[in-house]
Image: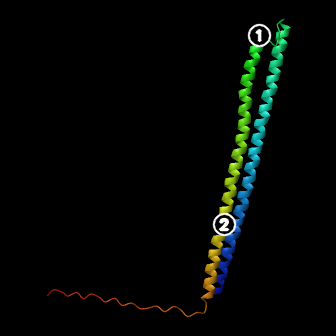
């Protein structure tokens, strides 16, 4: 019976190590997902920035054409003022989108690093717990067949209480 208990302890330790490895694998997968998600989000911001530039060119082209159609130089005066306002507004949106793209990549990398570290810790914890459990099993195995430890009897004198007469 003792051998079964010892084997069970050893198998439990091995299971802890395997569980740590599985947790590390799961965290690594989550890290890859976080990086991919951040990359996709960054790409969406870059696409949005490109769309902003396309809309700016379209608006400025229409403004120039409108100016020339109205008999005014489309590159001077109020047409130029409108173009400058469009450029500033679109420039702010464009730069914000590019900043958000870079920020989303940085945040994704940071999250992936945290998950990778958590996986390393989970694996180390599983290995250490497993080694401890296996060590306990090996210790129990080494004590099989040895003489039982002698228990020393302790004597505690009782207090004599005299009864009043």
Disc 2 designates what residue? Answer: 124
Tell me the quarter of the picture where residue 143 sits.
bottom right
Left or right, 33 with respect to 146, comes to right
Quadrant for the C terminus, please.
Answer: bottom left
Instruction: Look at mark 1 in the image and give the residue it sits on.
Output: 77
Above or below 111: residue 132:
below
Q: Position of residue 105 (x, y in %)?
A: 73, 44
* Residue at 63% across, 71% down: 129
Crowdedness near tag 1: few (<14), some (14–19) or many (≥20) residues, C-alpha within 10 Å = few
At a point 75% along the width and 11% down the height, the residue shown is 78
Residue 150, numbered label: none
Q: Residue at 68% of width from left, 55% of height from top?
A: 115
Q: Secondary structure at mark 2?
A: helix
Instruction: For label 2, count other residues whose C-alpha is less than 10 Å away and answer few (under 14), some (14-19) or many (20+).
Output: some
Specify which label sits upstream in the sequence, 2 or 1: 1
Nearer the observer, disc 2 or disc 1? 1
In the image, is 144 to the left or to the right of 54?
A: left
């Amino acid at each position: 019976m003792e051998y079964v208990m010892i084997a069970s302890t050893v198998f439990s330790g091995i299971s802890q190590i395997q569980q740590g490895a599985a947790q590390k694998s799961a965290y690594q997968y989550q890290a890859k997902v976080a990086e991919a998600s951040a990359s996709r989000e960054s790409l969406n911001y870059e696409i949005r920035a490109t769309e902003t530039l396309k809309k700016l060119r379209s608006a400025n082209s229409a403004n120039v054409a409108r100016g020339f159609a109205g008999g005014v130089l489309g590159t001077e005066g109020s047409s130029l003022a409108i173009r400058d306002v469009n450029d500033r507004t679109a420039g702010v949106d464009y730069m914000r989108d590019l900043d958000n793209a870079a920020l989303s990549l940085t945040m994704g990398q940071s999250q992936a690093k945290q998950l990778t570290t958590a996986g390393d810790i989970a694996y180390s914890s599983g290995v250490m717990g497993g080694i401890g459990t296996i060590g306990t099993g090996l210790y129990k195995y080494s004590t099989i067949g040895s003489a039982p430890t002698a228990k020393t009897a302790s004597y505690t004198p009782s207090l004599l209480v005299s009864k009043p007469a």
